[in-house]
Image (tube, helix red, strand yellow):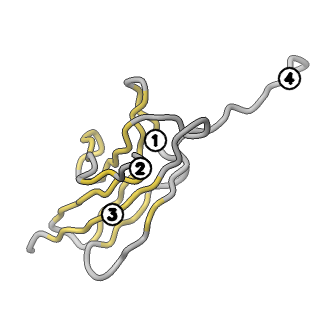
Amino acid sequence: MTDMTKKLSGHFVSGTRQGTGTLIIRTDLDWERDVYPIEVSSDGNTGSFEVEAQQPFVNFKPCLIKNRSLHRAVGPNNLLILAGQDSRVLYPLLLQRRAATSSLL
C-alpha cells in the first residue's frame, strides 16, 4: 500500500481559558510520539499538522504541552480520513476547569 498524507488544522484559544502552550497531536501510529505543527498562525492559536500513513485512516488526539505537562483533549479520539477531501478545523477542549466541591460531603 502506498503512503497517504493529509494536512490537518487545529485551533485553540489562548488566554485564560486554554492557557498558553504548544499544540500537538498524537496518533495511533505511535501514541507516545508528539507530532508538532508544520505551520503555526501568527497569533499562535492555529497549528497545521501533516500525517502520513500506509492506511486510509488514523485515530488522533489533540494535546497541549503546558509547563512540561501533557494535557489531552477532552472526549474520544478523532478520526482523520487520509483518502479524499477533508478540510475540517478542530476546536479541541484541552483544559477543563475543575468543578467546585462542597465541604459538606
- Residue at disc 4, secondary structure: loop
Q: Nearer the viewer, residue 105 or 88?
A: 88
**Image mark count:** 4
State the separation of the CA atoms marked 3 and 2: 11 Å
Q: Position of residue 74 (x, y in %)?
A: 54, 47
| Label 3 vs 2, first from the N-terminus | 3
Residue matched to label 3: 8
Q: Which badge, 2 or 4, is on the more N-terminal residue?
A: 2
- Do callouts 2 and 1 mark residues in contact (Cβ within 8 Å)? yes
Amino acid type, residue under disc 4 in the picture: Ser
Mark 1 — residue? 72
> Is 79 left, or right, of 105 in this rendering?
left
Lower position in the chain sequence, tag 1 or tag 4 = 1
Query: What label sits on residue 102 in the rendered view?
Result: 4
What is the quadrant of residue 32 in the picture? top left
Cα separation between marks 2 and 4: 32 Å
Secondary structure under tag 1 reads strand
